[in-house]
Amino acid sequence: MDQTVAVRLRRISAALLTLAAAAPFAAEVPASVTPAAPVEIRLREIDDIYAADAVVEAVRQATIASQLSGTVVQILVDAGDHVKKGQVLARIDTRETDAQVAAGRAGVAQAEAQLAQARLNLDRTRSLVQKNFVSQAALDKAEADARAAQAAADAARAGQAQADTARSFAELRSPMDGIVTRRLMEPGEVAAPGRAVLAVHDPSALRAVGNLPQYVLPKTAGATRARVELPQLARTVEATRVTVLPAADARLLSTQIRADLPPDASSYTAPGAAAKVLVSTGRARKLVVPEVALIRRGELVAVNIVGADGRPQLRQVRLGAQAGDAGVEVLAGLAEGDRVLPAVLAIH
């Protein structure tokens, strides 16, 4: 008797687990429903889509680095701040460059004084040559001294301009209107030429960048249309422009494809987000299910089909790529001739 009870208890437990697993979809199949407008699943000729894994990036972006060595004394912006072209974003210690500017100005003053003295000496020598008080060799030397002084003055002015330019590098400015993406240094750290301090991007122009394997390239030659799928948002948008680069990556054996997003893309995505570039590789006949018939619960997808007794039955399906207005490609779970119902049914 005890063994019989144990067996019955195990059966009841298994039944309860089965009901719990079906619970996410159970609410979609009420006991009293009237099937409305069933759609018969048929093979349709649709675009054969290749989905290239991609990443969203800004068309215009810049990593702002220092052009001189020094301690970062001030960073005026943070990640997420909007900035204007030419706006000062950070400052580097200018004591060394200030000394170079001062030395340059002193060098210019000294060179100009020597140039003025050389010109006066040249004028006196010319006067003496006319009166035959000195020889022509003295005049030649005075002219050479004047030209040397002029060259020294020009070199001093160039040195001063170089010092002034180096001094201007102590202020890091934004090269565009945009948003600060990252702060890569903090005040007190030592900046060096080529070391990044900030990153900025323009959010008004975003694109999805992916790679096409070489066997797909002949089928996508001259592609001008593509769609960009954002899986984390369950959203697909039409690309405004598609570019397949004319060179292949020898290491990855693939070619880069770029799909520009609409101008308002920054309102729902950002650089670094995962995406898929959906590009057509031809036409093919595939099973397609209407979007309105899909019942989604997390990662699970199901449809209500019309059973042999005329009542709706829940069936899990596995989906492929979007097929435009026709719906979504069905990889498994349905066969040609099955009739599916809209996810929202009329309840009596």
Image (cartoon, rainbow, N blue to C red):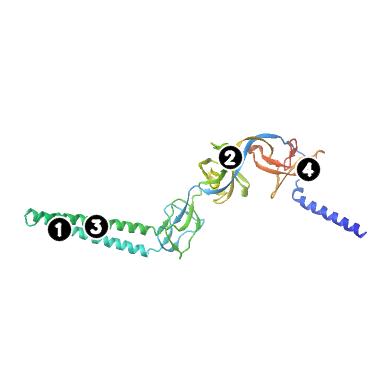
Q: Earlier in the sequence, mark 3 or mark 1?
A: 1
Name the image quarter holding the C terminus: top right
- Residue 260 appears in the picture as rendered: no
Amino acid, disc 1:
Asn
Q: Which of marks 1 and 4 is nearer the N terminus?
A: 1
Question: In the rendered image of this protein, does residue 18 appear above or below residue 307?
Answer: below
Residue 235 is situated, as x and y percent measured from the top left of the image, at 61, 45
Calculate the distance from the C-alpha at mark 4 to the C-alpha at mark 3: 95 Å
Amino acid, disc 3:
Ala
Mark 3 secondary-structure assignment: helix
| Residue at numbered disc 2 | 216
Q: Which residue is drawn at 76% across and 40% down?
A: 305
Q: How crowded is mark 3: few (under 14 residues within 10 Å), some or many (20 or more)?
A: some
**Dot in front, 1 or 4:** 1
| Residue at numbered disc 4 | 313
Residue 121, disc? 1
Amino acid, disc 4:
Gln
Mark 4 secondary-structure assignment: strand
Q: Which residue is drawn at 70% across and 34% down?
A: 43
Calculate the distance from the C-alpha at mark 2 to the C-alpha at mark 3: 65 Å
Q: In this view, does 89 lie to the left or right of 292?
A: left
Q: Earlier in the sequence, mark 4 or mark 3?
A: 3
Calculate the distance from the C-alpha at mark 1 to the C-alpha at mark 2: 80 Å
Asked whether disc 2 touches disc 4, contact meaning CB atoms under 8 Å apart, the reply is no
Q: Residues within 10 Å of mark 4 (few under 14, many from 20)?
A: some
Residue 27 is situated, as x and y percent measured from the top left of the image, at 76, 48
